[in-house]
Image (cartoon, rainbow, N blue to C red):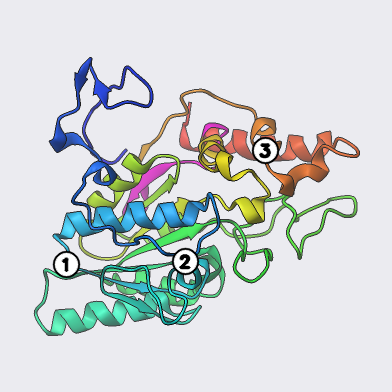
Amino acid sequence: MASGPAIRFYQVGSHAAGNRLLDAGLSSVQADPNRSNSLTKGHRACQGCGEALGARYALDAAMRATGGQLIAANATGCLEVFSTPYPESSWQMPWLHSLFANAPSVASGIAAALRVKGRSEVRVIGQGGDGGTVDIGLACLSGMFERNDDVLFICYDNEAYMNTGVQRSGATPPGARTMTTQALGPQPGNAFGQGKNMPLIAMAHEIPYVATATVAEPRDIEAKVERAMSLRGARYLHILVTCPLGWSCAAADSIRVARLAKETGLFPVFEAEHGEVSAVAKIRRPRGVEEYLELQGRYAHLFKPTRREDVIARIQAIADRNIARYGLT
């Protein structure tokens, strides 16, 4: 995985490493009292919102990696809405709101303007949810990749259009209930065989760097952002962010659910360079998908009133395929 300090924690929930306090130079960005707090207090995200955490982890890491020389272009979506209710803003960095579809193009334009001005020290990030990335913004994002524009684009994937009422997106997983994929019929929830695998689409462009991460592992996010900011050209980071509202899970389980997505194999965590997988995060404690599904009300119809072994087995098969495809165990 992305290069970072090799730290072995012996006491869970503490800063004790190897029976000694962790050196300040090895601490995470979020443990630094002088972190930039790019997304600061006052925003209106739901309790347990994974997107708010993912954005804070990623942008604070990027601010540290660039010495504060950073501009972000943000697509319309949950992140934009809860962080900038007019006339307020929770952003403590140069931040622009673009349309739902064109955040990659706006980010590319910013990068082009900086290049003309000779401001190579100022870096650019584009960001959006899965709707603005996988669906509405896909053409602009593909163009950004094709031109190899000097932008890191981050997708905060909560697997549906949460801001507009939990409608299906191209990243909604099979079997999941949304307002437009109801738990009805012989194949309840979202249909199998539809949607898009955005990390693989990004890899197909053979851009310098593609990576995936979950909000459950902030150090992994930080290391991957640091790696991405060390490179030039188009880069893509896909972060799975839990949505207690849309996923119908307890806010207190937000991180647990994100961790299970990785540990079951449903969300493979890896890095790729120029179209080839370069590193994978191995599954430490393999889990069956049932443990992941049962925590989320969007899958409740698979267990009650009639247990749908056939659908659960098809979801398990997806996880098993990911495990074999990426060598996760």
Q: Secondary structure at mark 2?
A: helix
Q: Which of the two discs, 3 and 1, labels the residue nearer the N terminus?
A: 1
Q: Residues within 10 Å of mark 3 (few under 14, many from 20)?
A: some
Whether residue 278 is visible to the viewer of this picture, yes or no, is no
| Camera-nearest residue between 258 and 2 | 258
Q: Height in image: 309 above or below 106? A: above
- For this rendering, which residue is in front, 267 or 95? 95
Is 210 located above or below residue 2 in the figure?
below
Residue occupying image coordinates x 28% and y 41%: 2
Q: Nearer the viewer, residue 60 or 225?
A: 60
**Residue of label 3:** 295
Residue 294: image quadrant is top right
Task: Looking at this view, name the residue that lies furthest to the left.
Answer: 118
Is 93 on the left or on the right of 177, as rendered?
left
Q: Mark 2 near mark 1, Cβ–Cβ under 8 Å? A: no
Question: Which badge, 2 or 1, is on the more N-terminal residue?
Answer: 1
Q: How many marks?
A: 3
Q: Give the residue at x 18% y 55%.
A: 65
Report the magenta residues as a range. 263-277
Residue 69: mark: 1
Q: Is residue 264 magenta?
A: yes
Q: Is residue 264 visible?
A: yes
Judged from this view, the residue extending furthest toward the top is 19
Q: CA distance from mark 3 to mark 1?
A: 40 Å
Residue placed under numbered mark 2 in the picture: 79
When asked about the image quadrant of residue 113, the answer is bottom left
Q: CA distance from mark 2 to mark 1?
A: 21 Å
Amino acid under disc 2: Leu
N-terminal of the pair, mark 2 or mark 3, is 2
User: Which element type, helix, strand or loop, lies under badge 3?
Assistant: loop
Marks 3 and 1 close (CB-CB < 8 Å): no
